[in-house]
Amino acid sequence: MNRTGLGAWLILVLALGLTACSNDPYRGTPERNATDTSMLSAPKPYSQYSYKVPAQYGTFIKPGELEPAVDFWRKTYAVWHRSEVAVHDDRYMDVIYEVFVLPGSVGEGLTSEQKNIVSQHREFWRAQLSILEAKVHNNEALNAIDRQIIAKLTHNGRQINHVVPGASERIRSQRGTRERFKQGLDISQRYDRQFRRIFKEAGLPEDLAFLPHVESSFQFSAKSSAGAVGMWQFTKAGAQTFMPDGNKRDQRLDPVASAVGAANYLKHAYKKLNDWPAAITSYNHGIGGMKRAQNQVGRDFVQIVDTYTGPAFGFASRNYYAQFLAAREIANNPRHYFP
């Protein structure tokens, strides 16, 4: 599809479908309605996933303010297929402008044509929001589509003068990972008992065993651009500090040895930061980084996510704990999400 055709099609989508997708942006996908309607029901209350942990180590809190982000990652992990892409606001995770299906066969990686299509969709919404920002700034008349976009942005009581400025710069796209997460669930069954025993023996919550869903989808040979390796994504420096025997023999591809290293790290991080949202986020952002966030903003994790502006505290760090909570809910009740 050329750029002109895409633009005309998207304008038609806006005119006909924006209201329909405002509260349930994926319900209009024929594939979703045909195959996955059972997954659109509400998940069990979070309290049903609770468990007993040593009092000195607290538990995983889920502030209500994080629910939009947790719900976004539930959809990413368990609802949206890898052929589907959500275009959304990278700060207000309940603001989803569209979910579209990529053409052709879609694998783990995208073709150059598919990447170009994703880019075109992002640019379309960036342009629409730039026009809207100018209208609001100049107090110009708004059309029906403008008002529907504003309704998305001001949902949950957000003020128009706070969320509309800069909206065009907050555009982001996210592919679904339903197939990858399901594969991770299958792989995790081989390790779940061992991982839980490791965390239990360390005096830590056993559900930390779900962290590889966020890190690697339980791919034992995963490698990152930052040099992290394995299911638990250890760097060389981190492995030397926390892995058994100082990682004298590189064990980062060994899932069990890496789980021991992760338990050592998370126990240390909790003692330094004194709560699980910050300690788990430090797995992505570092203990020093989270300590700086606490010193600057305070101990309220929601305030850290909303207001901390550390140079490396970007989208991944802001969302890391919400991703863990979403993965934990799904992994604790897989048949609800993958019947």
Image (spheres, rainbow, N blue to C red):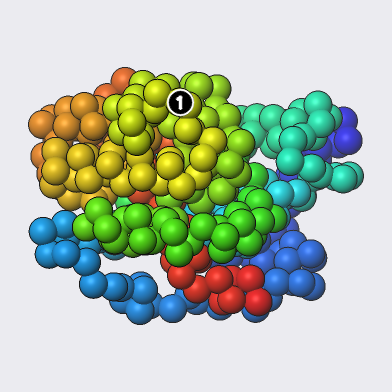
Quadrant showing the N terminus: top right
**Mark 1: few/some/many CA within 10 Å (<14, 14-19, 20+):** few
- Element under disc 1: loop
Residue at horizontal 45%, vertical 64%? 193
The kind of residue on which mark 1 rests is Arg
Residue 191 against residue 228 in the figure, above or below: below
- Residue that badge 1 annotates: 249
Q: Quadrant of residue 234?
A: top left
Looking at the image, residue 279 sits to the left or right of residue 251; the answer is left
In the rendered image, the vertical position of residue 236 relative to residue 332, given as above or below: above
Find residue 61 and report its horizontal and vertical position in percent: 25, 61
User: Considering only vertical position in the picture, is 264 above or below 145?
Assistant: above
Residue 122 visible to the viewer: yes
Between 175 and 123, the one nearer to me in the picture:
175
Where does the image place residue 239, in percent across and percent down from the top left?
Answer: 38, 28
Quarter of the figure that contains the C terminus: bottom right
